[in-house]
Image (spheres, grey):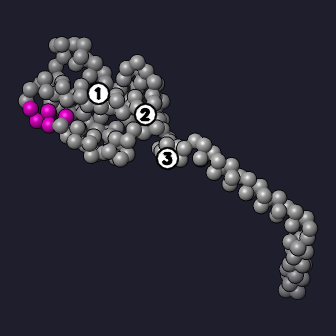
Amino acid sequence: MDGLDNLISEFYFWGNLFFSSLTFSLIKGFLEIYTLVLVADMILLIKQRGFSGDLRDTVLGMNVPPELITQKSKLQIKWNKIKERLKSEDQSDYKVAIIEGDNIIDDLIARMGYKGENFGERLDNINPGQIENIESLRFAHNVRNQIIHNENFVLTKDDAYKVLDCFEEFLRYFQVL
C-alpha cells in the first residue's frame, strides 16, 4: 500500500508543479484568447447571415415555407376542403381533389427552393433522403398527370383516398395534420 501512496503523492506533486508552471499559464492564456475569438466569429456570422432564416434552415435542414411552421391552421382548412370533395359520389370531384392537393404540395415544394419548371421536375430534383415520402409523392403526381392528360382515366373513390394519403403523409411529416 506504501507504493501506491507514494505513486499518488508523486503524481499529485508533479501535477501541482505543472499546473502552477509558466508553460501551463501560457497554454491556458492562449486557449482563452482563442475561445474569445471563436465566440466573436460565431456572433458575427450569425449577425451577418440573419438569425431567423438561418435558424429555420439549420433546424429543419431546408428552407421551409411558413405554412408548414406557423400558419398550419390555414393549410389545414384548405386540406379539409379538399377531403370534403371525397364525400361526394361524383368521380369529377375526386379528380378535382387530387389536382388541388397536387397544387398545394407543388407550391410548398417550390417555395422550399427546389428548382424545376413544374412539379414533376421539382420531384426529380429531390434526393430520396431529403423528403421522407418522395416516392409516394411521385406516385400521386403521376396519377394527377393521368387525370390531366387522359380524359378517359377512371378514378375510384378508394384510389382517390390512396393518392390523397400520399399528400397527407407529406403534410404529416411536417406536422401540419
Say what secondary structure mark 2 lies in: loop
* Earlier-in-chain disc, 2 versus 1: 1
Identify which residue is drawn at 15% across, 30% down: 157
> Does residue 61 sit above or below 99 in this rendering?
below
- Residue that label 1 marks: 103
Determine the image quadrant of residue 18. Answer: bottom right
Question: In the visual, does 24 lie left or right of 99?
Answer: right
Badge 1: few (under 14), some or many (20 or more) residues near its Cα, within 10 Å?
some
Give the number of the disc on residue 112.
2
Tell me where residue 176 appears, x and y as whole percent. 31, 45
Q: Which of the two residues, 4 or 142, is positioned nearer the viewer here?
A: 142
* Earlier-in-chain disc, 3 versus 2: 3
- What is the spatial separation of the Cα atoms under label 3 and label 2, in whole angstroms? 16 Å
Tag 3: amino acid? Ser
Q: Tell which tag, 3 or 1, sits nearer the viewer.
A: 3
Tag 1: amino acid? Asn
Identify which residue is drawn at 45% across, 24% down: 115
- Residue that label 3 marks: 52
> Does residue 12 sit above or below 63 in this rendering?
below
Identify which residue is drawn at 19% across, 29% down: 97
- What is the spatial separation of the Cα atoms under label 3 and label 1, in whole angstroms? 28 Å
Tell me where residue 78 appears, x and y as whole percent. 23, 38
Say what secondary structure mark 1 lies in: helix
Q: Which of the two residues, 110 or 99, is positioned nearer the viewer here?
A: 110
In the image, residue 156 lies in the stretch drawn in magenta: no
For the magenta stretch, what is the residue range? 82-88
* Earlier-in-chain disc, 3 versus 1: 3
